[in-house]
Image (cartoon, helix red, strand yellow):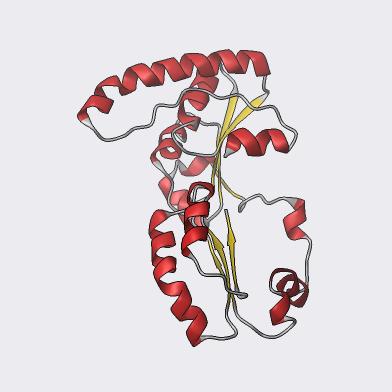
């Protein structure tokens, strides 16, 4: 996702080999070597970018980059968007200069003296208010400016297989029982065409990758 989204937004993108911590005996044996390789590659990329600060947002891909940044003596901050942090951000919080969190309850899961509660950053375009009736008409012209209930189903950037399967079994009944219900279903890029082929066309249902 990042490999296409970042360049399309006008920013330079560089990939580093990841060391995904899959819990298998074989992977646990080679994990230290993969992580070391990823840290060295991250060090090289940081030399090319010359950043003044490195921001980690979690996930196994961010771990080697942030470790390399710390070893280089660069300013390192962590941004935790969830109420419960993942392993990568939790580990990195001990070497980070600051930890920005979205929820007050998350502070207890990190070194408290490093935490700043700031909420989650959003694009300015998301803060532009659009009246509900206008938004509903844009997505569901048939619903007009009625008081139809709108359900947005999100499975994250890659989608969520369990959510897709659950909604695949439920959407028809939901729309049948509630005539005024409208659903926007984010399937994830990989599952989009499969879900699209399995779902019957309905004016109150929109699928998005």
Residue 49 lies in quadrant: top right
Q: Is 7 placed left or right of 196 in the picture? A: right
Q: Is 86 placed left or right of 77 in the picture? A: left
Q: Is 133 placed left or right of 168 in the picture? A: right
177 or 134: nearer the viewer: 177
Vertical placement of residue 88 versus 101, above or below: above
Q: Position of residue 16 (x, y in %)?
A: 52, 23
125 or 147: nearer the viewer: 147
143 or 198: nearer the viewer: 198
Q: Is 133 placed left or right of 58 in the picture? A: right
- Picture residue at 31% right of the left edge, 34% below the top: 22
Vertical placement of residue 5 versus 166, above or below: above
Q: Is residue 156 visible?
A: no
Q: Is residue 191 visible?
A: yes
Q: Position of residue 188 (x, y in %)?
A: 52, 51
Total labels drawn: 0
158 or 58: nearer the viewer: 158
Q: Position of residue 115 (x, y in %)?
A: 53, 44
- Picture residue at 47% right of the left edge, 24% below the top: 64
Vertical placement of residue 209 versus 29, above or below: below
Q: Quadrant of the N terminus?
A: top right
Vertical placement of residue 6 versus 197, above or below: above
Q: Position of residue 125 (x, y in %)?
A: 77, 54
- Picture residue at 64% right of the left edge, 27% below the top: 13
């Amino acid at each position: 996702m990042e490999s296409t989204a970042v360049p399309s937004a006008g920013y330079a993108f560089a990939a580093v080999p990841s060391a995904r911590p899959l819990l298998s005996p074989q992977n646990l044996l080679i994990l230290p070597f993969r992580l070391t390789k990823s840290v060295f590659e991250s060090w090289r990329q940081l030399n090319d970018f010359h950043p003044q600060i490195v921001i980690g947002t979690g996930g196994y891909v961010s771990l080697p980059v942030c470790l390399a940044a710390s070893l280089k003596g660069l300013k390192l901050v962590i941004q935790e968007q969830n109420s419960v942090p993942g392993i990568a951000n939790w580990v990195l919080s001990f070497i980070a200069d600051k930890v920005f969190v979205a929820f007050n309850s998350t502070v207890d899961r990190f070194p408290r003296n490093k935490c700043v509660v700031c909420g989650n950053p959003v694009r300015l375009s998301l803060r532009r208010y659009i009246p509900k009736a206008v938004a509903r008409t844009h997505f569901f012209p048939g619903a007009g400016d009625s008081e139809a209930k709108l359900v947005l189903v999100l499975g994250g950037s890659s989608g969520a297989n369990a959510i897709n399967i659950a909604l695949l079994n439920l959407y028809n009944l939901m729309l049948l029982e509630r005539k005024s219900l409208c659903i926007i279903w984010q399937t994830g890029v990989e599952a989009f065409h499969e879900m699209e082929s399995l779902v019957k066309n309905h004016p109150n249902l929109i699928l998005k990758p």
